Image (spheres, rainbow, N blue to C red):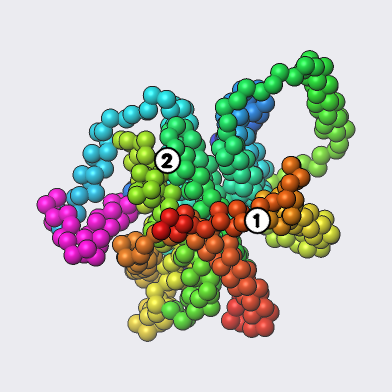
Amino acid sequence: MSIAVTTQIICFSVLSLVILIGALGVVLLESIVYSAFLLGGVFMSVAGLYLLLNASFVAAAQVLVYVGAVNVLIIFAIMLVNKKEDLKPISDIKSRRIISTSICLTLLSLLIRVDLTNVWSLSSPQNSIGEESTIRIGEHLFSDYLLPFEVASVLLLMAMIGAIVLARRDVMSKDISTGLPVDQELIEKSSEPLLTNKN
Amino acid sequence: MEYGLDLEYSFNEFLKGFGLSSEIAHIIWLPLPMLLVLVAAVVGVLVTVWLERKISAAAQQRIGPEYAGALGVLQPIADGLKLLVKEDIIPAKADGILFTAGPILVLVPVILSWLIVPFGQNLLISNVGIGIFLWIALSSIQPIGLLMSGYASNNKYSLLGGLRAAAQSISYEIPLALSVLAIVLMTNSLSTVDIVNQQSGAGILSWNIWRQPVGFIVFWICALAECERLPFDLPEAEEELVAGYQTEYAGMKFALFYLGSYINLILSALLVSILYLGGWGFPIPVELIANFLNLPINAPFIQVFTASIGIVMTVLKAYLLVFIAILLRWTTPRVRIDQLLDLGWKFLLPISLANLLITAGLKLAFPQFFGG
């Protein structure tokens, strides 16, 4: 066994262990902040797996999108609303747990079945594209995957407009939660710097 | 374009002369450039800290550090030693694990990004294909470390500073990436070596700054904001937040933040010089000089000469930018948080988008000037 192969096996086992333990931690830990940070670690390890598969562009995109954007926003949201409050006990917690476990196990068995029945075309080092993958991904995005790519951007635009409407209450005349007319003046005032009001 | 010193090849050949296999030689080679770059980064920080002290003193008509060594050059080392021997305190109600992991998460991505900084044709750790994209991806990890340390300190000022830092870094990453994209469009490659080679045609005239003046300014502003330098140092604004997310930190953990911010500043300056100022290129092409002196470009003497010129030029350009950053710090006031976000989202983002579109149009219209 050459040194390169040994390194690869060590990296693979360490990354898989981190992913497994991290993912379990995300689900099982009580503290939501720890879960969020562990999620970032899991995303990073997935990027590491992509690197091992010679897909450096996908790995960097994974870091940029999942760690740099998704995870940061999750942590951001948690820290802005981090109230210490005891959650209400749910009455039928046991049946809920059984249902969610069975759904997860079904999904897992489906994935295992796909893994076992599919014929994987293992690429040898000779025909792997490696660094060229960036160009290939670009070609595919602008030829045969053009429609899904554009539809995804429309979806993101819709989500963004929705978020803006929810955040800027002055575009609606009525408050969504209470149904009362929105006090427009209050919203205008709050965006002014505080010092100008004091004189 | 494959010329210039290839130290790795020569080193491996040298070791093979002792009867070692090429794999062993490769493993012995691997840590050397990493260590070299780490040392270079730390020495760069020491120089920058000294420059900062001296230039700030000059801007305020003081003398600045004077007694530690000639002109106070040993002052940054004294600072570093002080931080090394200081007691390492974790506040009683702080979260110990996150409090320790925060500074590490801030520093490691910055140092990893030095992987792609070229000082010459073969003078970089690794010419990875995704090059500049790796830096953009790595720099997006930093806000997690800032949020982590802000949260773990269990202090209102720290949390506010961490949140501000994350918001700032998310907002300015987008125009930054868009202005890098315009360069990549012109180069047809993400690799930093290709980006520099594409600018090496006619010396100073072919530098990207003439073709991307808007991109250059947008990139520089965003880089300053990413480094949390004044006028964008809101995350640590001393008058409002004590020291932001660093408030509770002392000793070596504080030193990690300090080191990280200065390494990041030098890295940004290096990247500006690579993307816009011709990287290791001399204002007059070295080939022209060699032809003028009737020397072959592959002669060992010329190769050593071009390599040293390359390193000197890269460092010189970077430190010129560091000097501008320091001058900016001591002459401009801090922006408010709403002004900061307005500048990022309402001004820099549309401008960099327009810049990208215009670059694409110009590339189609004049392929010989804007890369075909």
Position of residue B280 measured from the top left corner of the image (x, y, whole percent): 42, 67
- Residue drawn at x 32%, y 35% is B250
Q: Which element is circle 1 on? A: helix
Up the image or down, B299 lies above or below A194; here it is: below
Q: Is residue B54 magenta?
A: yes
The extreme left residue here reads B67
Q: Which residue is mark 2?
A: B157
Frontmost residue, B243 versus B361: B243
Up the image or down, A100 lies above or below A38; here it is: above
- Neighbor class of circle 2 (other Cα within 10 Å; few <14, some 14-19, many 20+) is many
- Residue drawn at x 43%, y 55% is A198
The residues colored magenta run B43-70
The extreme right residue here reads A117
Q: Which residue is mark 1?
A: A184
- Residue drawn at x 46%, y 27% is B95
Position of residue A126 measured from the top left corner of the image (x, y, whole percent): 70, 49
Up the image or down, B262 lies above or below B222; here it is: above
Q: Quadrant of the C terminus of chain B?
A: bottom right
Rounded to the nearest angstrom, the CA distance separating label 2 from label 1 is 31 Å
In the displayed structure, does residue B22 sit left or right of residue B368? left
Tell me which secondary structure the magenta stretch mostly adopts. helix
User: Which chain does the numbered disc 1 sit on?
Assistant: A
Q: Which element is circle 2 on? A: helix
Position of residue B54 measured from the top left corner of the image (x, y, whole percent): 22, 59
Q: Amino acid at mark 1?
A: Gln
